[in-house]
Structures are given as C-alpha cells and as structure tokens.
Image (tube, grey):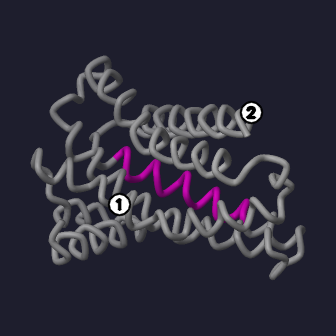
Amino acid sequence: MPLADAIKALYGALRMARFDADGMQFFDQTPTGFWRSFFAAVVVSPLYLGLVLVRYDLAGYTATPMARYLTVEIVAYIIAWVAFPVVMDRVVQIIDRDRHYIRFIVAYNWSSVLQNAVYLPVILFGTIGVMTADNANGIAFVALIWVLVYSWFVTRTALDVKAPMAAVIVLVDLMLSVVVNSLADSMI
C-alpha cells in the first residue's frame, strides 16, 4: 500500500471524526481501495499486540500456553476485521445500499484506525495500572461512546442511510465484536 494513500485515507478518517462528511472524498472508493483499506488492520496491529501481550501477564491468562493464547488472539483479530464486512455484504443488499458497499467498508476500515488509537491506549493504561481502574473505566466508557457515535456517523454518511438504520448497523457491529471476543476468551 502506498504510504501517500494511507496518509490520505487517515486524513479522511480524521475529517470524519470531526463529523465532516467531506472526509469521504479522501478515501479510495474503488475495488483496489477496498482491498487496500484492510491495511488499516496492519496499522492497528502493533497497539493491539501490545495490549494482548500485557493482558497475558497481568490479566490472568498465564495458565494458558503463550503460543495458544497468541494464536487465538491473532485469529480472533483477523476474524474481527473480516466478519463485519462479510455480514455487511448481505446487509447492504437487504437495505438496497449495495452500490455504497465499497465506500462504506473503506471508510469503516480507515476510521477503525482512529477508533483504536483512542480506545486501545485507555484499556492498555488501565491494564498496566497507569490509571486507577475507576479512571480507566470512566475514560473507556467515554471513549466507547465516542467510537459508537463516530461509527454511526461514518455508517450514516457512507451508506447514505437514515439515522436509525445507521444505529442498527453499529449495534450489529458491536454485537459481532462481542461474539468474536467471547469465543476467543472461551478458547483461551
């Protein structure tokens, strides 16, 4: 993925985070841009891996062999990045928005970088004790609300749907994440 394209997409995600619908113009909304948008998972992965490694030692997973723990977490990470686009492939057909599928997934993937850049450090700092549990939980709650509202805006804008439909799609994404994480935790 060309660095200039990634920077342009991240700028678009930043504009969308400021609730500026014109941020959509910075995303490559072609089939090539669709596949390249999954590079966002690579951008997020170091922060996620750091959290996974810290959680292994500090969150009581040491009874599980490290290789098994990492394998489950890495597979869950990949599934989490793929499952929602697969589900949305069908949803956009049902709601008659399949013409917007590519631009939605591109915006969704790149916006995930900013979401994780806000949310994961809070969880990491709470896990390692930089913040008290109460402070970390409070900030994580505020960050989660922002992530949900941001996701709602991206969904509403990219799919060109009404607010309630965007909310339902964000809830589907949230529930899918909970299922993937619960399955991963049950395998550790």
Residue 1 numbered mark, or none = none
Q: Quadrant of residue 138?
A: bottom right
Q: Earlier in the sequence, mark 2 or mark 1?
A: 1
Badge 2: how crowded within 10 Å, few (<14), some, or many (20+)?
A: few
The span shown in magenta is 140-156
| Residue 105 x %, y % | 29, 45
- The kind of residue on which mark 1 rests is Ala
Q: Is residue 21 left or right of residue 151?
A: left
Quadrant where the image shows the C terminus: top right
Nearer-the-camera pick, 51 or 141: 51
Quadrant of the image occupied by residue 139: bottom right
The residue under the point 78% across, 46% down is: 64
Distance Cα–Cα, label 2 vs label 1: 27 Å
User: Which residue occupies 58% across, 61% down?
Assistant: 146
Between 47 and 30, the one nearer to me in the picture: 47
As drawn, is 29 to the left or to the right of 80? left
From this view, report whether residue 102 is shown above or below residue 98. Answer: below
Q: Which residue is mark 1?
A: 40
Disc 2 target residue: 186
What residue is shown at x 55% (from left), y 51% (from top)? 148
Decide: is 105 above or below 46.
Answer: above
Measuring from the top left, give residue 149's x and y in whole percent.
Answer: 53, 54
- Element carrying mark 2: helix
Dot 1 lies on which element?
Answer: helix
Above or below, comparing residue 153 to residue 25 in the picture = above
Magenta span: chief secondary structure: helix
The question of residue 44 being in magenta is answered with no
Q: Are marks 2 and 1 in contact (CB under 8 Å)?
A: no
Q: Position of residue 106 (x, y in %)?
A: 26, 51
Look at label 2 and name its amino acid.
Answer: Ser
